[in-house]
Amino acid sequence: MRVSGSGAGSVRLQLLLSLAALWLSDANEPGTAMTTRDINQQTRESISDYTEKGHDLSTPGSHLTTQDFNQQTEETVSNLTLAVYSISIDGFSSAPEEKNVILYSPANIALSCDLTRPSTDSGTVEVMWKKDNETVKSSNVTVNETKNVWSTQYTLKIRDRNQMGNYTCVFKRDQEVKATFHLQVPQIEGKEHHVVSYVGDSVTLVCKSIKYVPINWIWYMSNGSDKVAVNDSLMPDKYIMGEKYANITKLKILKISEKDDRSYWCQAVFKLGESKGKVSLKVLTYMTPLKPFLAIAAEVIILVAIIFLYEMYSKKKQKHAEDEKEFEQIEQLKSEDSNGVENSTTRHRKV
């Protein structure tokens, strides 16, 4: 059956009106009139509220923070890529070369040594690698020789702390030259420093890891020749330990006494080892600043007393000398008077 143009137009119009009515009826139902903008706004608000309450948005049970995710991502990349560390040695007369290699998580690395030589040198060279003091025998060591360079490379998959240490390439002929790679975990900034405080005060000891975030921080304190871990949960009124999962840690000691005058160690724990820093706490009493003044005052008093005693002794000695002189004068006068009487008697007798 054919439908005329006007009839088809009316059918289309009725269909459009029906769809419009259906849409309007759905839109009037409570809670359904939401645009994409409204949905996005609510999503942002929900995420903001959830974040402000201290929750993460990971799958239930995973408990991965952004920091953990970044660390895992970096570890995945390091496992897939090869980091190359090189040392160039300028001939056999060169001094031993050294380089620090900082690793805080498992990684694939290649240690490379290049020894330059004159183009006229056609001699052979013995090449070896050592870990600490032991010679390495591994298929991961390669040796290449070109016109002007002897080179060797040692490829390593660093997975645990036992693989950390000193790796040395040695070129040996009639002479020997070497270069050493020191594989280390990140170091504590300012490995040793001193803090001074007074009895009754509170003090905060701080340690910082340069650039890298440890897995954990542990504080120790000296107890004679031993080290004892500081447990802030057992002594909350004495110790307050700061954030453990950051590149900085703080240990606050409350109500300091003279017993707290000791050394403290902060230990940053990484997957490939630990790094330590030392803080020496010196506890002073409020009489301590007065001790130098009291010592000076005592010295002044002693000096004044010595001067006073010396003056008294000098005066006494002077008076004694004057008395002796006066006594001598009296004796002399008596002697003269006696001589005068004798002379007068003698003259009288002569007359």
Image: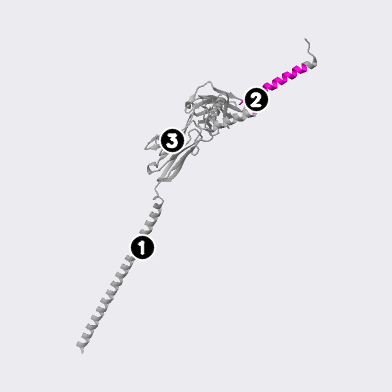
Residue displayed at 57% across by 23% down:
80
Disc 3: which residue: 219
Disc 2: which residue: 27
Mark 3, other Cα within 10 Å: few <14 / some 14–19 / many ≥20: many
The answer to whether the residues at label 2 and label 3 have Cβ atoms under 8 Å apart is no
Residue 297 appears anywhere in the view: yes
What percent of the width, then of the height, locates residue 297?
38, 57
- 144, above or below 338, in the image: above
The amino acid type, in three-letter code, at marker 3 is Trp
CA gap, disc 2 and disc 3? 63 Å
What percent of the width, then of the height, locates residue 26?
65, 23
- 238, above or below 135, in the image: below
Residue 307 marker: 1
The amino acid type, in three-letter code, at marker 1 is Ile
Of circles 2 and 3, which is in front? 2
What percent of the width, then of the height, locates residue 336?
26, 80
The answer to whether the residues at label 3 and label 1 have Cβ atoms under 8 Å apart is no
Q: Is 262 colored magenta in this rendering?
A: no
